[in-house]
Amino acid sequence: MSVTIDITGVPPERIVFCPSPLAELGNAVHVLAEPGHHPGHHAWATATTAALEPGLADRLLEADFMWRSTRSDFLLPARPRETLAEELDDLDRLDDEKFVGAALEISCSPLYARGGIPSPLVDERSARRALDLAAARGPRQAAFVERMLAAPTATRAWIRRLLEDCDEAFFADAWRRIRVQLAADARHKTELMRHKGLAEALADASPALSVEEDGESARIVVDKLMEARADARAGAVTLVPSVFGRPHLMALYSPGWQPVIMYPAASREVGGLESVETVRLRLDALAHPVRMRMCRSLARGPYSTSELADTYGITAPEVSRHLAVLRKAGLLTTRRRGRYVLHQLDFSVVARLGSDFLESVLR
């Protein structure tokens, strides 16, 4: 399974490696929302969370569905700028339908890859779906989605102010520390592509990236637990290095958006030992392709049974059976929020499975 990006006839100068402050801010707030995904940033996340003003922390929680489990498309700019302010100005130029549609794609529905989800601003069914998925995250998230649907212009201004306040509170300092590293990584990949070809540059970025060529056609292949296609033949492809994004490898492939790949610019190894019986249970649990794909969502954040059913297009009873197998293998944690039971991958266990498994489910 993979995401493939058609680059047939795309000249090398339109395949660009470049850091983005907005993308990195999106990754930074994701680290704050899900520190278990990023053991290498544990100290930073702990210190930053402790120093947050209560009001800012509350606002981050209110809007966290845009970066907790997925990453809204507008947080992966196709044309990175030098400053966050410039990238936020570019966001302001998006029309309301496109912005709100990207903001409220909460569950990575299979329809996303086909461009089959109309904007909730113009489609009642999409609006109900967004409200239902937000309600599973909590009453504050549901209220935020209601405000966005009722007053998109005002809510967009609220989101920009939130990101600007994050920049002032903690991100500007972090960006000053890492921007040189990210720029150096992008330059290195660009030089590799120039002298050794795109395949070498992609392999250096991630073992999950490769190039396939078949006669006159060419494709970038992103090894993901999903099947999707994107077309860059009339445009370009942007590859964005990230420090805070490790170990995630993300691909923006929705129709109507230029393809963007966010790849980790650093590495960290984790590992451990388990008993033979424990390993057997976990291997059996992960042998089923649907459960392995579900782990991708459960690794990114807590999901209810109904959210998983919506994401993978299967019935709620079938989801429950798969969750029971994963729980028996000790791979899940469960907690209740109101009438919803939320499930998530247990990162204390995942870390002991080793870095290969961790990276495969978090890409």
Image (cartoon, rainbow, N blue to C red):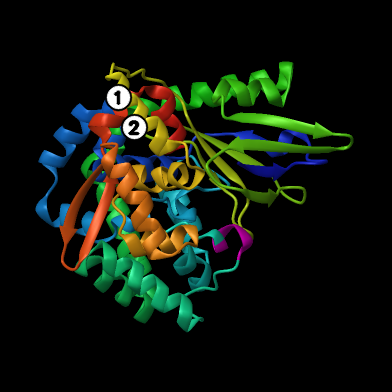
Q: Determine the secondary structure under disc 1.
A: helix
In the image, what residue occupies the spot 10% across and 53% down? 54
In the image, what residue occupies the spot 27% across and 20% down? 274
Q: Nearer the viewer, residue 180 or 73?
A: 73
Q: Position of residue 212 (x, y in %)?
A: 75, 32
112 relative position to 167: left or right: right
201 relative position to 122: left or right: right
Q: Position of residue 194 (x, y in %)?
A: 72, 21
In the image, what residue occupies the spot 49% across and 36% down? 249
Picture layout, residue 139 above or below residue 70? below
Kind of residue at disc 2: Leu
Name the quadrant of the N terminus.
top right
Q: Which quarter of the figure has residue 209?
A: top right
Q: Determine the secondary structure under disc 2.
A: helix
Q: How far apart, in angstroms, are the residues tagged by discs 2 and 1? A: 6 Å
Q: Which residue is mark 1?
A: 277
**Are discs 2 and 1 less than 8 Å apart at CB?**
yes
Q: Which residue is mark 2?
A: 281
Badge 2: how crowded within 10 Å, few (<14), some, or many (20+)?
some
Q: Position of residue 72 (x, y in %)?
A: 44, 55
Q: Which quarter of the figure has residue 251?
A: top right
Can residue 296 be seen in the rendering of this structure? Answer: yes
Residue range of the region highlighted in magenta in the rendering: 111-115
Q: Which quarter of the figure has residue 188?
A: top right
Q: Position of residue 192 (x, y in %)?
A: 66, 18
